[in-house]
Image (cartoon, rainbow, N blue to C red):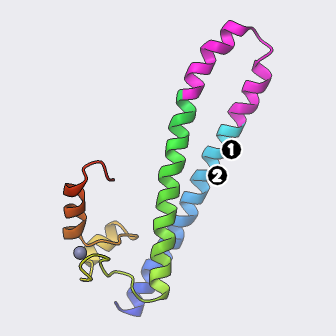
Amino acid sequence: MQQRMLDRAKKKLIKEREKLLADVNHIRSEELDKSQKNATGELSGYANHMADGGTDTIEKQISLGLISNEEAMLIRIDKALRKIEDKTYGVCELCKEKISQERLDAVSYATYCIKCRSQEENKNNNKV
Ligand SMILES: [Zn+2]
């Protein structure tokens, strides 16, 4: 891949990384906020607390799910940035063919070409 394209991809990845980090921090601080409110809320009646507890748990699971999604993306982005450094960026990890520019524009941290990606998806439907 041309240096110009690598530089472009790198800039894009760094931007995405910053955005993700900000999101994760945002979710984390909201979560912290909630648990602090819960701690003081414990003084106000047992029944209320139990009722709140149910939804809080679900909300917490949702935001923890969000965090792990975003962290998984961060890992992919870091990996892609490392690939840019060692000049293996844009090469499919499975078939070693070049990943199309179109796909890299859409998914800048892609490590598989579109063909291998769909083969992997067929092998394991649960895999995201
Ligand atoms: Zn491939």
Which residue was labeled with disc 1? Answer: 29
Which residue was labeled with disc 2? Answer: 25
What's drawn in magenta, residue-wise? 33-57
Residue drawn at point x = 45 percent, y = 66 percent: 76
Tell me residue 94's x, y (percent). Answer: 27, 75
In what quadrant does ligand 1 lie?
bottom left
Residue drawn at point x = 80 percent, y = 23 percent: 40
Element class at badge 1: helix
* Label 1 Cα crowd, 10 Å radius (few <14 / some 14-19 / many 20+): few
Q: Is residue 21 magenta?
A: no
Tell me residue 60's x, y (percent). Answer: 57, 34
Tell me residue 56's x, y (percent). Answer: 59, 26
Estimate the spatial distance between the alpha carbons at disc 1 and disc 2, rounded to whole Å: 6 Å
In this rendered view, identify the residue nearer to me: 23 or 68: 68
> Are discs 1 and 2 less than 8 Å apart at CB?
yes
Measured along the vertical axis of the image, is residue 85 above or below residue 63?
below
Mark 2: amino acid: Asn
Mark 1: amino acid: Ser
User: Which image quadrant for residue 34?
Assistant: top right
For residue 34, side relative to residue 72 (left or right): right
Magenta span dominant secondary structure: helix
For residue 19, side relative to residue 49 (left or right): left
Residue drawn at point x = 76 percent, y = 18 percent: 42
Instruction: Tell me if the residue at label 1 has its CB under 8 Å from ligand 1.
Output: no
Of the 4 image quadrants, the one containing the N terminus is: bottom left
For residue 123, side relative to residue 8 (left or right): left
For the image, the number of numbered tags is: 2
Q: Is residue 51 magenta?
A: yes
Residue drawn at point x = 23 percent, y = 79 percent: 95
Element class at badge 2: helix
